[in-house]
Image: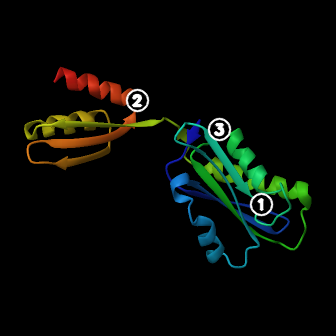
C-alpha cells in the first residue's frame, strides 16, 4: 500500500470540459467538498472517492457521483485509487461542463484520467503503519532520549515535564520503535 503526506492538484480537459482533481490525505477530507463547491460556484459537480484504514486495519472505501450518472464518476475515481494501491486519502474532482456531452463512457474515462493526472504529480510513499509508545525518564536523561530520537529520525514526539520525571509519547513505525527500545536498554 502507498500513501501521501500533503495535498496535490491536477487538471484534465476533454471537449472543453475541465476536471480539477484534488488529492488529499484523509485527515484533510472532512468539509473539503463543501469548501470546493463554495470556491467553484460555476462548477457543475464535485465528485469524490476515498480509501482509508479503520482501527481494525480494514480498508474502507466510499465514493459519490454528485448527481452525475450513477457509476460514471465516483467509481472510476475510486478504481484509480484501488489500482495504484493508495490508502488513507481522498480525491475530489471539480467538473466544469464544456458544452459537449461526453456520454457515460467518456465521462468515466475523463474522471479516471483526472485522478491519474493528479496521482502522477503526487509524491507517493510506501505506507507504514505507525505505533504509539509511551515511556518515562528522569530529567537527567532528557538529552540522551532526544539524541536517540533524532538519530532514528523519530519526529512525532510529545513530552510532558512532571514533578519528578518526564513523560514521553512517540509515534513511529514498528521497525524504528524496536530499534529505539533496543537502544534504550543499552543506555
**2 with respect to 45 (left or right):** left
Task: Check disc 2 and report the residue beneath it.
Answer: 174
Residue 186 location in percent, x, y? 19, 20
**Mark-to-mark CA distance, 3 and 2:** 21 Å
Residue 86 location in percent, x, y? 62, 42
**Colour scheme of the picture:** rainbow
**29 with respect to 109 (left or right):** left
**138 with respect to 119 (left or right):** left
- Give the camera-side residue of 53 and 118: 53
- Give the camera-side residue of 150 and 12: 150
Task: Check disc 3 and report the residue beneath it.
Answer: 85
Among the two numbered marks 3 and 1 on one chain, the one whose residue lies closer to the N terminus: 1
- Give the camera-side residue of 137 and 55: 55
Q: Residues within 10 Å of mark 3 (few under 14, many from 20)?
A: some
Which labelled disc corresponds to residue 43?
none
As helix, strand or loop, the secondary structure at mark 1 comes to loop
**Mark-to-mark CA distance, 3 and 1:** 21 Å
Which labelled disc corresponds to residue 65?
1
Above or below: residue 174 compared with residue 102: above
Residue 24 location in percent, x, y? 57, 55
**105 with respect to 1 (left or right):** right
Among the two numbered marks 2 and 1 on one chain, the one whose residue lies closer to the N terminus: 1
Which callout, 3 or 2, points to the residue nearer the camera? 2
Image quadrant where residue 17 sits: bottom right
Amino acid at each position: 500500500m502507498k500513501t501521501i503526506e500533503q495535498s496535490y492538484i491536477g487538471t484534465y480537459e476533454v471537449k472543453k470540459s475541465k476536471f480539477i482533481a484534488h488529492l488529499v490525505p484523509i485527515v484533510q477530507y472532512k468539509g473539503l467538498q463543501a469548501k470546493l463547491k463554495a470556491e467553484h460556484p460555476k462548477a457543475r459537480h464535485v465528485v469524490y472517492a476515498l480509501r482509508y484504514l479503520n482501527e481494525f486495519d480494514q480498508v474502507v472505501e466510499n465514493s459519490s457521483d454528485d448527481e452525475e450518472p450513477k457509476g460514471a464518476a465516483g467509481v472510476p475515481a475510486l478504481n484509480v485509487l484501488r489500482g495504484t494501491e493508495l490508502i488513507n486519502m481522498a480525491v475530489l474532482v471539480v467538473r466544469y461542463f464544456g458544452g459537449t456531452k461526453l456520454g457515460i463512457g467518456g465521462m468515466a474515462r475523463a474522471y479516471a484520467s483526472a485522478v491519474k493526472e493528479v496521482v502522477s504529480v503526487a509524491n507517493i510513499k510506501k505506507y507504514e503503519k505507525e505505533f504509539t509508545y509511551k515511556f518515562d525518564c528522569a530529567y537527567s536523561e532528557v538529552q540522551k532520549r532526544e539524541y536517540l530520537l533524532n538519530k532514528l529520525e523519530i519526529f512525532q514526539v510529545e513530552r510532558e515535564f512532571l514533578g519528578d520525571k518526564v513523560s514521553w509519547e512517540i509515534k513511529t513505525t514498528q521497525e524504528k520503535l524496536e530499534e529505539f527500545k533496543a537502544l534504550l536498554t543499552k543506555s
